[in-house]
Amino acid sequence: MIALVDCNNFYASCERVFNPKLKDRPVIVLSNNDGCVIARSNEAKQLGVKMGCPAFKIKDLITRHNINVFSTNFALYGDFSKRVMDVISTEVEKMEIYSIDEAFLDFSGYAEKKRGIALRQKVKKWTGIPVSIGIAPTKTLAKLAGAIAKKHTKSGVFIFDDGNLIRRALNIFPVEDIWGIGRKNAKKLNLFGITTALQFRECDSNWIRRNFSINELNIQKELYMEIRYPLELTQKRRKNICTSRSFGVGTTELLKLKEAVGSYANNCATKLRYQKSCCTNVSVFLSTNPFKPCEPYYNPHIVTQLDVPTNDSMEIVKAALIALNNIYNDQYIYKKAGVILGGVVPQEHMQLSLFDSLDRTKRQNLNKAVDRVNSLMGRDKVYLAVQGNVRKRRVKQEKLSPCYTTRFSDILEVVI
DNA sequence: TCTGGGGTCCTAGGACCC
DNA sequence: TCTGGGGTCCTAGGACCC
């Protein structure tokens, strides 16, 4: 049996932990640049705040209902994620951290509701974060059980321990809410009269294979309790590493784009070194504002192949800046830029080039030193000149909460 | 005025090989 | 007149996830 632990309204819950005034109050968290709603407390959901909605569209609603608004605070959420996962790991032998707020656990041996309830209480007590737990024979069914646990139980835990129960649940569960069936596929299925999870499970497998991909077939098997997506216990290296940002205000200036793209490339290289990998290609993209139909849309993208796999900041930044020069056109107002590193290979599998002129050992030592300074003293303490003034370029975050758990100056004081 | 960021996997079609 | 058969690899685009 597999258990899925899912933090309830995760970012909103993190904001609440050190701010008890927010209890039972509507809370929302915004994306970068305070753009869109990316998390909502139950109270905010009840007021009709939709996921992904641009903040400016619900200004009235926010004032009218006194909704508590927060800018995204990833230092805080990342730290809480780690705490929650640490607590869970004290209770299980094997677990797969699936996302910032979810984990699949091996519950074989002792898969009972009370085990889930005890775990849930422990996480709440030790971290302050409420979670829901779904227990079932497969991941797909565990996701479904988790959804039921969140919406329809008081205990926050739901277990699929019998075939009849699964059948009854599938019969009322909409096909579009199955894990892995997205909007597009749900629409297609609806056209064939398939609206519930049970109808999907009872479809002819050959028909599914012909009209959809292998994934949908696997999902169908998982609904029949056949494991197609086993627990993944080893942490996988990322195959692509991306850093991209929207700008608060659009720009046509090449210099500003250089600073941005240089910074994103440097950030990607740092992430790459962190997972002990090298990349073999660097791609850069730009984008104008897609929400302005009156302005022409321009979305160029270019991939540069590297001779030698590398994770050297300067080399990657250089490649990114050359690419930028090649796609830049001064006739457009750019709203977003990004860098993607691809062809990622483990550091130790590096294929050297016959014509390489770089002293790679020297560069490695330099990068290592920079990484160490930045990890000890705070990010961007040392950066490349081409990045410009990194502190000046901060994104808009008007409602940022303190970094209660990751910055000494933000730690709460208890006054007696 | 104001619309996020970071990933994975699958498939079809083209280029290429012998 | 009549023009094969069996592969691999790469890429773009699309779907999905959080």
Image (cartoon, coloured by chain):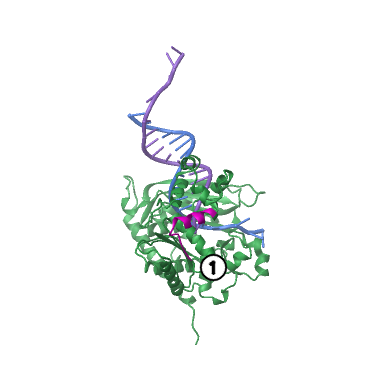
Chain colours: A green, B blue, C purple
Where's the N terminus of chain A, which quadrant? bottom left
- Inspect the magenta stretch and tell me whether residue A163 lies in it: yes
Q: Kindly identify which chain the residue marked by label 1 belongs to.
A: A
Decide: is A41 above or below A140.
below
Q: Is residue A211 left or right of residue A311?
A: right
Residue A38: where, in percent of width, then height?
A: 56, 61
From where the camera sits, is residue A328 visible? Answer: no
Q: Is residue A308 left or right of residue A18?
A: left
Tell which residue pokes out farthest to the front in this image. Answer: A164
Q: Residue at x 53, y 57 (%)?
A: A245
Residue A126 or residue A188, whichever sits in front? A188
Residue A160: where, in percent of width, then height?
A: 45, 59
From where the camera sits, is residue A301 visible? Answer: yes
Residue A151 or residue A214, whichever sits in front? A151
> Which amino acid is tagged 1?
Ala
Q: Residue at x 33, y 45 (%)?
A: A355
Q: Residue at x 48, y 73 (%)?
A: A128
- Inspect the magenta stretch and tell me whether residue A392 lies in it: no
Residue A251: where, in percent of width, then height?
A: 59, 55
Q: Quadrant of residue A63?
A: bottom right
Query: What SS does tag 1 mark?
Result: helix
Overall secondary structure of the magenta section: helix
Numbered range of the magenta stretch: A157-171
Residue underneath mark 1: A12
Residue A156: where, in percent of width, then height?
A: 49, 67
Q: Quadrant of residue A28?
A: bottom right
Residue A413 or residue A50, whichever sits in front? A50
Circle 1 residues within 10 Å: few <14, some 14–19, many ≥20? many
